[in-house]
Image (cartoon, grey):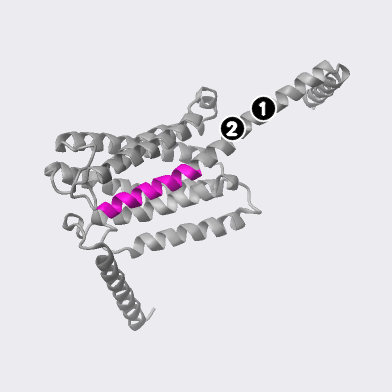
Amino acid sequence: MPCAVKGFIGDTMESLDTTINSYLDVWLGPRDPRVKGWFLLTNYRPTFLFSVLYLLIIWLGPKYMRNRQPFSSRGVLVVYNIGLTLLSLYMFYELVTGVWEGGYSFFCQDTHSGGEADLKIIRVLWWYYFSKFIEFMDTFFFILRKNNHQITILHVYHHTTMLNIWWFVMNWVPCGHSYFGATLNSFIHVLMYSYYGLSAIPSMRPYLWWKKYITQGQLVQFVLTIIQTSCGVVWPCRFPMGWLYFQIGYMISLIILFTNFYVQTYNKKAASRRKEYQNGSAAAMNGHTNSFSSFGNNVKQIKQRKD
């Protein structure tokens, strides 16, 4: 590529960054100077472009894999999920200790009264923001393994919005009242990614019983976050009120989507199993129907063993 073209593209991107940043500063006010120059935080463009690329892969990935064999990637999945489990555990520990050291209030905590603890929280929350890039791999593994049914509206909405929201959080409110949701979510992710890591090992699957409770924990997390955020509205401090209202609205959207997922995944399956059980009981009472079905199954099993 000629140097003149490179220079033109570079100048255009720099001009675009300046324009976007100026608009954001007008809308949201001055950024927190403590994160000035931090990796990926200076400009919104990288976060936005990664989000667009993520959506593009979701659209094109299944088309690319349509006539190809799914990848097993079992070993990679174990390493990936255990790695995210450890990262989530680290973030949870650091957030809890940082909150304790800074004497953070549950009801409302501003962004400049925790001293050194604020800086500790900011550093951990940057890792929390960065982990949202890593978690895009959840979707990519679904595509490579041809588990496209798991790429739901909830899944895509949650992954895309969390990355973008946390870019804004890190630039304007990178500590203080922002700590609570990230702390709970890190704990839930310890449970979730440990489950997925262990479930990639076939011999461990019979011992994994807590998948259903992960979704329940997520719903509890959203409700607790709304309660804690509402405390900042009722008993305000110097934490910006607009962020609190936004957080409440976002949590409500997640509650709606996760509740729908829970009902579709667990309640309907349980109802379906009860219906099958009742049909089986009725067939047994009718006599030959159930016996004939059992006979057919036995014949099939004998044939399979002979094969």
At mark 1, the secondary structure is helix
- Find numbered disc 2 in the image and state the secondary structure of the residue it sits on: helix
Compared across the picture, whether 154 is left or right of 221 comes to right
Image spot of residue 4 (x, y percent): 33, 83
Q: Nearer the viewer, mark 1 or mark 2?
A: 2
Q: Amino acid at mark 2?
A: Asn
Q: Residue 182 got which mark? A: none
Q: Which residue is mark 1?
A: 273
How many numbered markers are drawn? 2
Q: Quadrant of the C terminus?
A: top right
User: Does residue 78 appear in this view?
Assistant: yes
Mark drawn on residue 267: 2
Q: Residues within 10 Å of mark 1 (few under 14, many from 20)?
A: few
Q: Amino acid at mark 1?
A: Arg
- Marks 1/2 in contact by CB < 8 Å: the verdict is no
Left or right? Give the position of 96 relative to 116: right
Most foreground residue, 204 or 54: 54
Q: Residue at x 73, y 22 (%)?
A: 278
Res 193 seen here? no
